[in-house]
Image (spheres, rainbow, N blue to C red):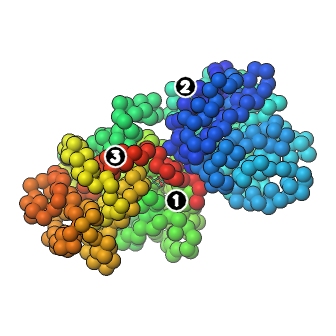
């Protein structure tokens, strides 16, 4: 959460900062701000509550010149979103400014000490406390900025990615990181720093991912210097970025979310490419092969994740238990990390995360590692903190996901988890060759089937129009479609603000059935398969209470069609692969409903894409 960007070089900084902030707005959009030092040495700070566009209107006509600057887009933690709490934050003398992503947990006690020494504070932020501390140390200990940052961070408990700018030293930027992501882009005679590489992808492909407790000193015209908090010099490890500019642009779609929904045939295919060989009946995932012995012996797999990734984990529970016959537990990372869980050293913990930066998931990994478990990551962002903190893993290849509501990352996760389950099933000798091959062939047809479902967009828009004014919605599914119901409900509530709940279809009669009346849309996944007849009975229970049924059914279905208000026909597939296809119409329904209600689908209120605070 929070996006940070900095530039130092020979170009005008402001356009780079603003474009960068707009690309990182998915990380938070409560307020935005920039600080730029002009040629005369004045430091101009502009900050505004609201989106980056508000900042741009506010700054119009002001002095925006200068080739060194920092920028921030905020997701509020300490202090309400307003102009004063927006970053950059000033030091006591106003000579230093800082942008920060993370939480300084012991800020209150540091603040108390600083107040006793005469400091006064304008904002309610923990960030302002830290920049005051840095200046206090710099002046009293007569230190250079880099060393003062190191010394201050030794006193800090919490997480941070921060950048400091000194009005009196405009050729230097100091950055530091712990817990929150930070990547440095190295150009010919310029540096970029940002929370992810999207702000500078068109300028350089040479990047350094900073590690925790490192401080970087970026001086115009000099080499990048990195030290740790103990003042040991670190040789920067320069990597090549593979991201392309097109992948982070809307490409003609009205919203990123719609673009990403439409990208799913490709992102699912990309996630299988080189791993699934249906012809030869092989699945090859390096992440599994490297830990084959562990998987053969493991008595249990524990999935940890948050949000949509947690729903993918629930799908994985069915896949691994059904195919590999291995007991699975699925945990919210935030609960797991704080409840002293029982973990054995032959457990395999699989962390699922699109961003690879979710603070709770990262902490769950550290806990599992400390108890001796083998930890694998299923991440979308290459080089992300979770990918690096894990012993191994398998990347999803969904490409950058910008819309805050996750869509293509979910189907990519489920694809990769299906492949993992298949390979582990084979390793453990739990699957017959014919069943293995049958699933491989079926999986190969999924991208084309998703394409078929996307063609239903006009029908889905019409259905959306019918239910756009609902106050509540219920989503039902059984078996492997139950997590799909949860995901459908999450998509609707997060982008349209309609209260929605996902339930196992049979569990409805233990509570939610009381909510059903003629106003209530009930979305049901009722595809042909093992649970079909049971779900048909649940649909009848809803109809008997005059609820409205919108059912996702298998192509050609007649029975549910006769009962439902609307049916959405999806191509037939194996029971276990239904989530990959059935989730698509639910994503589109949520999208259209949110657009019709005038909601900002790419940046829903109060949410952020990358949750780097607990
Ligand atoms: C946030 C996002 C969700 C995402 C969740 C977990 O809440 O808005 O879309 O599912 O974080 O994120 P991760 O990056 O770990 O998958």
Circle 1 residues within 10 Å: few <14, some 14–19, many ≥20: many
- Whole-Å distance between the Cαs marked 1 and 3? 34 Å
Whether the residues at callouts 1 and 3 have beta carbons within 8 Å, the answer is no
Is residue 273 positioned above or below 36 on the image?
A: below
Instruction: Please say whether residue 115 is visible from this viewpoint.
Output: yes
The residue depicted at 57 percent of the width and 70 percent of the height is 338
Earlier-in-chain disc, 2 versus 1: 2
From this viewpoint, is residue 415 visible? no
Closer-to-camera residue (539/243): 539
Q: Which residue is mark 3?
A: 596
The image shows residue 305 at horizontal and vertical percentages of: 46, 60
Callouts 2 and 1 close, C-beta under 8 Å: no
- Point out the frontmost of discs 3 and 2: 3
Determine whether the residue tagged by mark 3 lies in a helix, strand or loop.
helix
**Split into 4 quadrants, where in the image is the C terminus?**
bottom right
The numbered mark at residue 203 is: 2
Q: Earlier in the sequence, mark 3 or mark 2?
A: 2
Mark 1 or mark 3: which is in front?
A: 3
């Amino acid at each position: 959460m929070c996006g940070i960007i900095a530039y130092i070089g020979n170009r005008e900084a402001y356009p780079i900062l603003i474009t960068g902030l707009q690309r990182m707005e998915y990380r938070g959009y409560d307020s935005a701000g920039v600080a730029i030092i002009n040629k005369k040495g004045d430091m101009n700070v502009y900050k505004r509550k609201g989106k980056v566009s508000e900042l741009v209107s506010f700054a119009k006509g002001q002095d925006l010149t200068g080739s060194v600057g920092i920028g921030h887009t905020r997701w509020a933690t300490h202090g309400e979103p307003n102009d004063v709490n927006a970053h950059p934050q000033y030091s006591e003398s106003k000579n230093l400014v800082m942008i920060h992503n993370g939480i300084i947990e012991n800020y209150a006690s540091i603040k108390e000490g600083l107040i006793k020494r005469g400091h006064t504070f304008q904002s309610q932020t923990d960030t302002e406390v830290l920049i005051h501390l840095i200046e206090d140390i710099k002046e009293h200990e007569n230190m250079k900025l880099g060393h003062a940052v190191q010394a201050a961070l030794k006193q800090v408990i919490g997480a941070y990615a921060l950048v400091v700018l000194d009005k009196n030293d405009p050729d230097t930027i100091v950055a530091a990181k712990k817990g929150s992501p930070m990547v440095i882009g190295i150009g010919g005679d310029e540096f970029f720093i940002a929370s992810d590489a999207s702000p500078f992808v068109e300028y350089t492909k040479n990047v350094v991912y900073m590690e925790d407790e490192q401080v970087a000193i970026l001086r115009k015209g000099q080499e990048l210097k990195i030290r740790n908090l103990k003042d040991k010099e670190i040789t920067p490890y320069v990597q090549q970025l593979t991201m392309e500019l097109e992948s982070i642009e809307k490409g003609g779609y009205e919203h990123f979310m719609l673009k990403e929904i439409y990208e799913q045939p490709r992102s699912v295919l990309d996630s299988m490419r080189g791993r699934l060989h249906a012809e030869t009946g092989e699945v090859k995932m390096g992440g599994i092969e490297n830990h084959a012995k562990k998987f053969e012996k493991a008595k249990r797999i524990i999935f940890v994740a948050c949000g949509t990734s947690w729903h993918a984990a629930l799908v994985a529970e069915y896949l691994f238990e059904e195919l590999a016959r291995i007991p699975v537990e699925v945990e919210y990372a935030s609960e797991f990390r704080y409840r002293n869980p029982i973990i054995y050293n032959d457990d395999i913990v699989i962390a699922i995360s699109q961003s690879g930066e979710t603070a709770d998931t990262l902490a769950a990994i550290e806990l599992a590692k400390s108890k001796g478990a083998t930890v694998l990551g299923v991440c979308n962002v290459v080089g992300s903190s979770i990918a690096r903190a894990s012993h191994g893993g398998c990347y999803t290849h969904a490409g950058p996901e910008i819309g805050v509501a996750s869509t293509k990352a979910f189907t990519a996760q489920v694809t990769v988890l299906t492949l993992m389950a298949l390979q582990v099933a084979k390793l453990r000798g739990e699957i017959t060759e014919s069943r293995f091959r049958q699933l491989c062939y079926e999986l190969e047809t999924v991208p084309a089937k998703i394409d078929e479902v996307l063609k239903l967009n006009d029908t889905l828009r019409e259905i959306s129009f019918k239910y756009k004014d609902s106050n509540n919605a219920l989503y039902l599914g059984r078996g492997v479609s139950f997590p799909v119901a949860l995901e459908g409900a999450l998509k609707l509530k997060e982008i349209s603000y309609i209260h929605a709940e996902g339930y196992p279809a049979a569990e409805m009669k233990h509570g939610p059935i009381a909510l059903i009346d003629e106003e209530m849309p009930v979305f049901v996944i009722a595809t042909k398969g093992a649970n079909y007849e049971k779900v048909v009975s649940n649909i009848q229970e809803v109809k008997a209470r005059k609820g409205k049924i919108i059912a996702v059914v298998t192509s050609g279905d007649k029975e549910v069609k006769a009962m439902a208000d609307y049916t959405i026909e999806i191509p037939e597939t194996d029971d276990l692969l239904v989530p990959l296809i059935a989730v698509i119409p639910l994503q589109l329904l949520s999208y259209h409903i949110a657009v019709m209600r005038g909601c900002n689908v790419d940046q829903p209120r109060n949410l952020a894409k990358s949750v780097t605070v607990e």
